[in-house]
Structure formats: structure tokens, C-alpha cells
Image: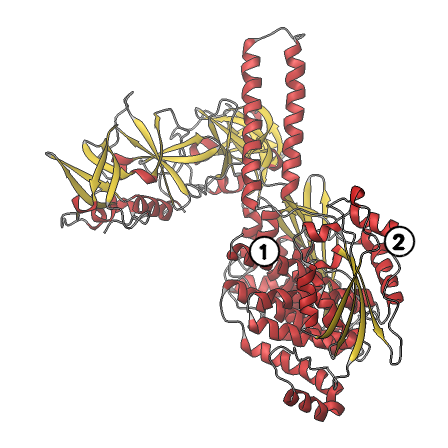
Amino acid sequence: MSNSSIRDTFFEECEELLEALVEGLSAMEENAEDMDVVNAVFRAVHSIKGGAGAFALDRLVNFAHTFETVMDKVRSHELSVDESLMRLFHRSGDQLADLVEAARDEREPNAESEAAILKELDTYLGDVDKNDDFAFDAVTLDFDTGPVPIDLSEPEPVMRHFDIRFQPSPALYSNGHEPLLLFDALAELGTLSVSANLDRLPEFDAFDPNDAVIDWQLSLETAEDETVLHEVFEFVDALCTLDISVREEGDEAPAATPEPLAPAEVAEADSEPSPPSFAPQPVSEPKSAAQQSTSQQAAAREEPRGPRPTLRVDLERVDRLINTVGELIINQAMISQRIEELELPAVAHLTNELEAYKLLARDIQEGVMAIRAQPVKPLFQRMSRIVREASEATGKKAKLVTVGDSTEVDKTVIERLADPLTHMVRNAVDHGLESPQKRREAGKDPTGSIRLSASHRSGSVFIEIADDGAGLNRARILEKAIEKGLVSPDAELSEQEVDNLLFLPGFSTAAEVSSLSGRGVGMDVVKNAVAALGGRVSISSVPGSGTTFTIVLPLTLAVMDGFVISIADQTMVIPIASIIETIRPNSKDLHSIGTTGQVISVRGAYVPIVDVARNLGLTRERAPIGTGVLLLVSTEGQGLTALRVGGIHDQRQVVIKSLESNYGAIPGVSAATILGDGKIALILDPDELVKLNPGAPFLPPAPSPRMELRHA
Amino acid sequence: MLDVTEAPTETQFEFITFSAGEQSFCLEITQIREIRRWAPVTKLPHTPDDVLGVMNLRGAVIPIFDLAARFGLGTTPDNERNVVIVAAAGGTTIGLLVESVSEILSVDKSAIQETPDIKSEAARQAILGVISVGENMVRVVNLDAVLDNEMGGAV
């Protein structure tokens, strides 16, 4: 493995560790006494420090070290966690994430906030160490700073005597670890003596070279803390049985031969060699062997609660697989079509087998799609930081409640949802919530809550961002919209319509530009980002009790149910989700308005008819009234609209292929798919389609430099 | 002058020459993925004349341009012999419709001359240089320029 790929792995692991850190910190908020949680947080910071050290990321190491040292004080009950410390921990976690990100992108991190947090962290260290100040100074002077890692919390060194029993499992050797190196590392810490226990060495005939039968009894006299000893064994943690105990003053050295370990334990180690990993493991700082074993048991008990084993796969490989499976589906459709063309008798076995093939192909496709699915949890976790920052910036108190963290969504959706969600959460705090005082006056909890929830409903993903603030001020919105000339003063709008004004470009209700608003991102950007994912966003608001934004997204981005339709002489696909009903027009329901307008009466309402072929510029002629089929769709811009198409041929699931990756966006067309005969069919976007200028034939969407090239 | 990063020490370049709009062009061989027979494409609405449509290339949707039309030399007439050169640059794959592919040209770097100082800025952008082959002049197509303009115009 090249150095850069090891580095990449480190940063990937950092991401996981930071997730665990955020999770641990929010768990600490619930219960700071839970030592397992505190240990998990400590461990995450510690592991980041360890990895960063290996890559000489000094700033990161330095920060993580200070953070870890304060955390260690909590762990050893020297510090109790109060609200302000908790807040500092959160900020430290955020800062650590920033530092990791800066290190990964090889840029300078924000030194200002780093220094501020470090200073605050130092005050916690200072408080505790006040009495030891003098002694602490003496330490730094007495020792050569080189090989001795100086822990700020370290009191004057006391030589202690540790007894270590170290029994490697076979996996330790098969993973390439070498006990001698570990012993060398220990020897650097102080005076070490090692004795090997050969009791379990079998007769030569029975010797299995794959087994690990030698264990060691070590005794170490050192000024170091027990944590340092554990650090030496960090990378072989899960690969050996390790007992570290402090010999009390005057204790006799234990018998040279340790009791052989219980066979069951050995068997377990044999059958389940676990790979070394950075993954946070609850490791406590045991004072005796007995405590150690209890904590190990506790860890074992909790294992089911931990994450299930996962596989890290390069996204490109998954995409390639998805593409190939997409091809398989298309190929299956092709074969079906060919077989249909043969017009075999219905009883032919081939038809049954084809049916089975179809089902299998669909199963594979769903399985492959599921690989891309990821829980929204990390995305939601990121939002807790946004809420913290926003509440700090606005002086409002806010907490984030998340529901449905485990809901799985396509990875691309998660990535592309981060920005809109950030904006909406920030808005919810900035515009949604009232000030603590106003909340108190209204008889509410002064701390507002932002509720983020995700769920699956009828083949779609629902994501809701709800605040318990004052609700939308509709009068103010309308006033503002009229002021900006977005609606006419005498327009009568329903509540829903007023709410939707928020999505108009350039709309902002903030009376003054706060540090949060005025960043050039409006709700229209959110709406576009969601629309780009094939989703919709809507608002509902109850005065006095809050506003809820609901984002509805398709489950996967790669497959879609569609109608195969014909337009002019081309085959196209239209998403079924957008179609309300299909109508074969009856001439008595059709009416003309002026020379160009056509409407159809649908149960008493007149609905405008849009000729798709003309709007796409595929034909200049108007199709005679009463021909073709009408598809009733509900569009964002124009409300209910009837799309006129040549005919509907089929309903099927299609694999969505991007047009933009090789060409670019085309108005009215959202993507493409490949049909059974290998030809490409365009997938229409009804919302955009109705906005197009009818009859504009094959015009480029914008003037482009290539126009000049023509005259070259 | 010619931006080929493959092997700086090597001065031999291989080009595939083809004709479009009755002029000779060539593309560096490393930029060409494959050469296909012409097959009907799916037309795209709201696109300029030089965009013929999209084609299915083993599951990827790639746009096909009429190179002659792209260079303002008129549309390529329908012909059985027409071929599509599939070329890739910077993660984008496109197809170029040309009249015919002629030969593989192996030339020394020094044989590539700078584009003569003609007035049209656009033409200089589209052409990296020229190579003299016998009595013929072959224009080296700047694929990046073709792509950039395309993306700029389409988005």
C-alpha cells in the first residue's frame, strides 16, 4: 500500500471516529456519568491523535492531546461535566473535525477558534493542576523532553512496578505483529524483565506451528502511567489476552509461572481472530486485573449494540456494478422483446423461464441499489453542529431532536442534501425560533427545539425539518412579496400560496441581515437542489406553534417507474409519479381559447393543454385538437396541466442515465434511459416542459461560444 | 505547444486522420476510444444543429456532434461511409461524426507546426496546430476546446 492510500485510510477512519465522537458527546449530554460513553469519546479523540501522530500532523496531535487530557480528567472523575464544559466539548469536537478536514485538504485551519478553544481547555487543566504547578515545572526541567511524553496532568513521577501478563493469540502472529517489538517499546519506558512461560508447549509430535502457545510474564518499573502501557499494546488489543496490574508497595512478586489461561478463552481467541482496527472500543483504565475483566465483560455484553460489521468499498466500484446491473436489466428487456416478437404459443416453457429471469434480474438490481443506501444518521449528526452554531450566533437557545436516524437513503441524496438541510436548519433557528424571552412570555420552554426526522413512506423518503417557533408570519410575507413586486397588491392568495412565496428567488423575511442570513442562499436554492434530486419540498405552518418543511424524495435515483410514450416520431419516458391520470380526450370536453390556446374540461375545471412535441421544438405544427392522449400532471409553476402526447405504449421500470455527465442539461428533459432495443429514450420533466416556449425549434438554451466557431 | 503529458521524453506522436467538411483533421490516438459505424441516434430537443443527438455506448449516454457543422463547414451529408469517432477527455466522452477515417499518422513533435496566424480566434482555439503530409495539410483538433465550448453552451 502506498503512503497516500494509508493516509486516505486514516482520514476515512477519522470520519468514522468523528462520527463516534459526536454520537458519544450527545450521549454524554444525556448522561455524563456513563463511563462507557466517556471512554468511547476519549478513545475516539485518542485514536485520531495516534493516527495524526503517524503522519506528523502536529497541530492536530497537539489539539487532540489537550482535548484528550481534559477528557481524561472527566474519565478519572477529577472533573465533573457541567453545561459549560459540555459546550466546550462540543466545540472541541467541531474544531477537531475542522482540523482533520484541514489536514486532509492540506490547508491552514482556522487558527483563531483553535487558539480560543485550546485556551479554554487549558483553564480546565490549569484548575486541576494549580497545586502541582511547581512540581510540574520541576518535571519539565528534570527530564529530557525527547523520549518522555509529557502529560500535562502528570503529577511528580513516582516509580511504580507493573506486572504484565501477555498472551498472544495466533491471530497476532498471522497479522504480522512481533512481541519483541512490543517488549522493546516497554523497555524504553523503564526497567523491564521478561520471562516466557513455556508450560503449554506441547510434545514435539503434537506441535502445531499455527498455534500460539507461549505467553509472557513481564515486570516493568516505570514512572509512566498505566495508560501509556496500554498504548504500547494498542494495536494488538484484540489479538491477545493482556493483564496489567500495579504491584503495591511491599508486595511480593507473583509466582514466576502464571496460571494457565482457561481453555475456553484460548479457544475463543483461536476461532475468532479479529483484525486490528482503529474502531473505538470501550477500554477503561483498570486499577486491577479484576476490574479489567469486569470491563471486558461489559464490553462483550454491549457488543450487539455496536455497529454491525461493514465493508468499505470504493464508490466507483459500486457505481460500475450498478451500471452493469442496469445493463443486465436492459438486456433482459431486449430479450423479452425479441421473444415476444417470436410470437411463441403462450404455454412455451421459455415464457416461464423468462419470467423467472426477470424476477432474478430485479432482485439483483434491488440488492445492488441497497449497497448505495446509507442511514441518514451522519447527515443528521452534522446538523447538531449547525444548530449549536446558529443558536450561538443568534443568542437563541435551541436543541436538535432527530427521529429516524437509521432511515436509509441513496448516498448521492445524502451528499446533495447536506447543503439544503444546513440552510433550512439554520433558518429554523434564525427565523423560526423566538428569543428565549419571547418564548418564556408565550409560556414555552425557553429552549426551542428543531426536530429532524426521516422516514420511508409509500416508496418515497420523507425528511422533515420542524421547529416549535412562532410559525410563519403570513401578513409579513405577503407584505414583503408585494413590496418586491412578486405578487400584485390586490391578489388574493390562500395560506398555502402565501407560504410558498418563500420559495421565490430572492425572497427573505429577515427584517435585517443577521450574521446568518444574507449569505446569498435563499429557499429557492433549497427548492432547486431538492428538485434536482427529483424531489419536492413543501411548507406547513401553525401560528404560535411552529413551521415544518417536508422534503419528499424518490427512494433511489437510479431506477424509476415510467410510461413509455411516443412524441412526434420519438419514444420517450415520463415519470409515473408525476401523472395524476390519463385521458383519452372526448371532443365535447375540448375547447379552444384564442388562436393557440387549448383547454380540456376535467370534471368541471378547465385545464390548459400543452403540446409536448411543440414545446420540445420537435414539430412546428399543432396537432389537431382531439388527437393523441392527454396526461394530467400537477406542475409547480402552472398547477394542473394536461400534456398531449402521441400515445402510451408501456409502463415499466427504467434505469436512469445521466445526460449531464457527457453533454449537459436540456430544458424539459431530466435524463435518459436505454430501451429494450438499445436505443436511448429521453425522460421528460413535466415541470420544466410546461415552462418551455412552444414551437421554439431546436434553439440553444443560451448563446454559446460555439456560435463563433461556425464562422471559423 | 501540444499538450501531451503521456511521456515527455518521447517526441513521436500518433494521430488518426479523418476528413470532415472536405478538410483533413486529426486527433491524437490516445484521445480516441473507438471508431464506430454510423447508426441512427436519438435526437435531443433544443440543441444546435451540430448536436446530432445521443447514442448508447454500452450503457453510457454520449452526445454525437457533427464535426463539420461544429467547425462551420456545413452539415455532413448522409452517407454509408460516415463514421463516429468516440473520443474522451477529462471524464467526458463524446462522439464525433466525420466523413471517413483515413490513416494513422506517426509524426515527430517537430513536424507539428503552429496554426498559421489566421484572423479567426475561434479557429485558432479549435486547432492545436497543423501537420504537413505530402501535399495535404492536416489540422490537429483541440478536443478540449470542442468539449469546453460544448459544455459552456449546453449548461
Residue A69: horizontal and vertical position, in percent? 71, 76
Q: CA distance from mark 2 to mark 1?
A: 37 Å
Query: Mark 2, mark 1: which one is toward the viewer?
Result: 2
Residue A470: horizontal and vertical position, in percent? 71, 66
Residues flagged by tags 2 and 1 on a common chain? yes
Q: Secondary structure at mark 2?
A: loop
Left or right: A15, with A303 as reference point: left
Query: What residue would you read off at disc 1?
Result: A9
**Which three-letter amino acid code belongs to the residue tagged 2?**
Ala
**Which three-letter amino acid code belongs to the residue tagged 1?**
Thr
- In depth, the one of A246 and A199 nearer the eye is A199
Query: What residue would you read off at disc 2?
Result: A262
- In depth, the one of A242 and A112 nearer the eye is A242
Numbered disc 1: what chain? A
Q: How many marks?
A: 2
Task: Name the N-terminal-most of marks 2 and 1.
Answer: 1
